[in-house]
Image: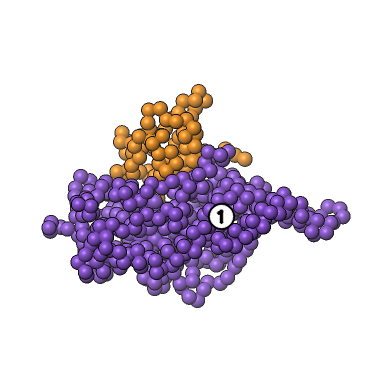
């Protein structure tokens, strides 16, 4: 056995990787995290929102020291067509229970903090190195190949993101298909704290999350989003890759048009774009779950497709953190038993099955199919804005409310409404 | 509606371009229907076709999202890797 062999090597210093590293190092395991970016978070981006519950369990009151942007106290969901919007607005003060809160975050800052916690616990984090391959002997993963060198470990945790090339090489991750994911593009637009407070109705440290269905994704599966950061907003569009042949405009153009929508434009007026980013979002839910455990290897976070888009909540980071925690527990148990085989690491799967991760993925397993329906992103947004438009427009004698609403319902079709209503109720 | 200029947006980003060592390479004769998807999908607008119909691609400006890899795979790509360590896009916000 090589004397510089590690207990664990983790590929990727994102949320799953750093959470695992922290817990493993705390338990006394020799842990190495290899990150291809110049620092943890350098390659990572998010739409913007972290549901705190899973990280709160590991670092109680983490938000007091972590670089979170704003605590989300304002939820907005809009149906928008090319010019109009109808919005559901829900405001609620910051919860007394920290685990109920959610925060806007920027990954470049946040991941460095989390990596710092892992280092404090004793993990080694080596940035600026790409892992090119895995060492596999007799079907067991024994380490990594990076920069022409081999490094050995009892266990390798793949936390290498949605394009898990290493997971594919092992045959554990089947290549992600367009039906299972979306592309997200985002601008970070700098505004003053006061401008954000005024425009989104917030106080300092409190912020808004705003989702938009309809026009941003050109009537196809996807949507627009805005999250308020401390002194910037994250504004973006997500678009399902499987509709790419049909759609009439480019994804960057969708973002531009969304930014110029009459509802959105005043919110970003005078702001300065300081970054433009893109990322693939795994949205297949349970149907894209890889083989999570192999001999000497575990897969966590986006690499395992752990993401959940329910339409009104979009999650990935809380699942990544929980999967990182579960992976760490499994490796610690494997070390105690001295068994790093697939069987010895199997508690990872059990841990996930018993956690909200698999429970929620199971609960919403029919939802991606239900949401993949153009009525959701085209007919219904137009129906809602059309009804609202008639409701609030006065020009001569009025007609009864039912007569205002009926034509809009007829346009979508009553059977479609009933069908989608019933299916929707079942899917969530 | 204004036409988007993606190059201007990419201009605010921080990149370390690995000159002469592209991490994405296209096949000789890419399927044009597939290529058309990437013209729309690529967040960085790196897949271009000029007025004469000639295709252009340069991986400087790549956001490393993998959309092209997932969407069109081998019909377009001969090689798709992450850039070498330290190279490529570096998010200051993310």
Relative side of A223 to B68, left or right: right
Q: Position of residue B22 (x, y in %)?
A: 33, 36
In which quadrant of the rendered image does the C terminus of chain A lie?
A: bottom right
**Chain ID at mark 1:** A
Seen from this angle, which residue lies furthest right? A397
Callout 1 secondary element: helix
Seen from this angle, which residue lies furthest top? B52
- Residue at 83% x, 59% y is A400
User: Eyeballing the image, is A230 above or below B62?
Assistant: below
Q: How many marks?
A: 1
The answer to whether residue A228 of the structure is visible from this angle is no
Relative side of B3 to A307, left or right: right
In which quadrant of the rendered image does the N terminus of chain A lie?
A: bottom left
Rendered image coloring scheme: by chain
- Residue at 42% x, 53% y is A288
In the rendered image, which residue does mark 1 sit on? A370
Q: Which chain is purple?
A: A
- Residue at 61% x, 66% y is A90
- Residue at 46% x, 25% y is B54
Residue A321 or residue A140, whichever sits in front = A140
The crowd level at tag 1 (other Cα within 10 Å; few <14, some 14-19, many 20+) is: some
Q: Colour of chain B?
A: orange
The answer to whether residue A280 of the structure is visible from this angle is yes
User: Eyeballing the image, is A198 above or below A252?
Assistant: below
Relative side of B4 to A263, left or right: left
Q: Position of residue A384 (x, y in %)?
A: 69, 55
Q: Position of residue A344 (x, y in %)?
A: 25, 64
Q: Position of residue A29 (x, y in %)?
A: 22, 66
Seen from this angle, which residue lies furthest bottom? A96
Relative side of A179 to A296, left or right: right
């Amino acid at each position: 056995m090589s004397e510089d062999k590690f207990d664990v090597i983790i590929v990727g210093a994102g949320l799953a990787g750093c959470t695992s590293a922290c817990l493993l190092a705390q338990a006394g395991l020799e842990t190495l995290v290899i990150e291809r970016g110049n620092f943890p978070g350098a390659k990572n981006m998010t739409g913007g929102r972290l549901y705190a519950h899973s990280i709160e369990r590991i670092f109680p009151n983490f938000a007091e020291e972590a670089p979170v942007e704003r605590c989300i106290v304002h939820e907005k969901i809009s149906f928008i067509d090319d010019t109009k919007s109808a919005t559901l607005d829900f405001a609620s003060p910051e919860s007394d229970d920290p685990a109920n809160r959610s925060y806007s975050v920027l990954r470049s800052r946040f991941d460095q903090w989390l990596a710092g916690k892992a280092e404090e616990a004793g993990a080694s984090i080596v940035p600026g190195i790409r892992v090119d391959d895995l060492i596999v002997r007799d079907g067991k993963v024994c380490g990594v190949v990076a920069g022409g060198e081999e490094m050995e470990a009892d266990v390798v945790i793949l936390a290498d993101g949605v394009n898990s090339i290493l997971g594919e090489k092992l045959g554990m991750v089947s290549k992600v298909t367009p039906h299972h994911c979306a592309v997200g593009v985002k601008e970070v637009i700098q505004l003053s704290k006061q401008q954000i407070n005024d425009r989104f109705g917030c106080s300092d440290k409190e912020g808004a999350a705003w989702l938009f269905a309809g026009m941003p994704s050109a009537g196809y599966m996807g949507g627009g989003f805005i999250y308020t950061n401390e002194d910037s907003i994250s504004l973006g569009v997500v678009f399902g890759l499987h509709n790419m042949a049909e759609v009439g405009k480019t994804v960057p153009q969708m973002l531009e048009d969304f930014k110029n929508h009459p509802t959105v434009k005043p919110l970003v007026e005078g702001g300065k774009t300081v970054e433009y980013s893109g990322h693939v979002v795994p949205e297949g839910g349970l149907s894209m779950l890889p083989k999570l455990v192999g001999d000497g290897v575990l897969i966590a976070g986006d690499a395992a497709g752990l993401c959940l888009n329910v339409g009104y909540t979009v999650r990935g980071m809380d699942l990544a953190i929980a999967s990182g925690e579960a992976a760490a527990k499994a490796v610690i148990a494997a070390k105690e038993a001295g068994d790093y085989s697939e069987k010895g690491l199997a508690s990872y799967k059990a841990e996930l099955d018993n956690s909200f991760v698999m429970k929620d993925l199971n609960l919403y397993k029919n939802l991606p199919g239900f949401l993949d329906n153009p009525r959701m992103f085209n007919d219904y947004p137009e129906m809602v804005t059309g009804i609202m438009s008639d409701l609030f427009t006065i020009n001569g004698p009025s007609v009864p409310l039912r007569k205002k609403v009926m034509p809009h319902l007829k346009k979508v079709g009553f059977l479609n409404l009933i069908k989608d209503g019933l299916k929707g109720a079942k899917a969530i | 509606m204004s036409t988007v200029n993606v190059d201007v947006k990419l201009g605010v980003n921080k990149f370390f371009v690995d000159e002469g060592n592209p991490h994405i390479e296209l096949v000789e004769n890419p399927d044009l229907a597939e290529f058309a998807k990437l013209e729309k999908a690529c967040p960085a607008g790196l897949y271009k076709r000029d007025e004469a119909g000639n295709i252009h691609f340069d991986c400087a400006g790549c956001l490393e999202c993998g959309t092209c890899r997932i969407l069109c795979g081998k019909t377009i790509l001969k090689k798709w890797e992450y850039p070498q360590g330290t190279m490529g896009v570096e998010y200051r916000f993310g």
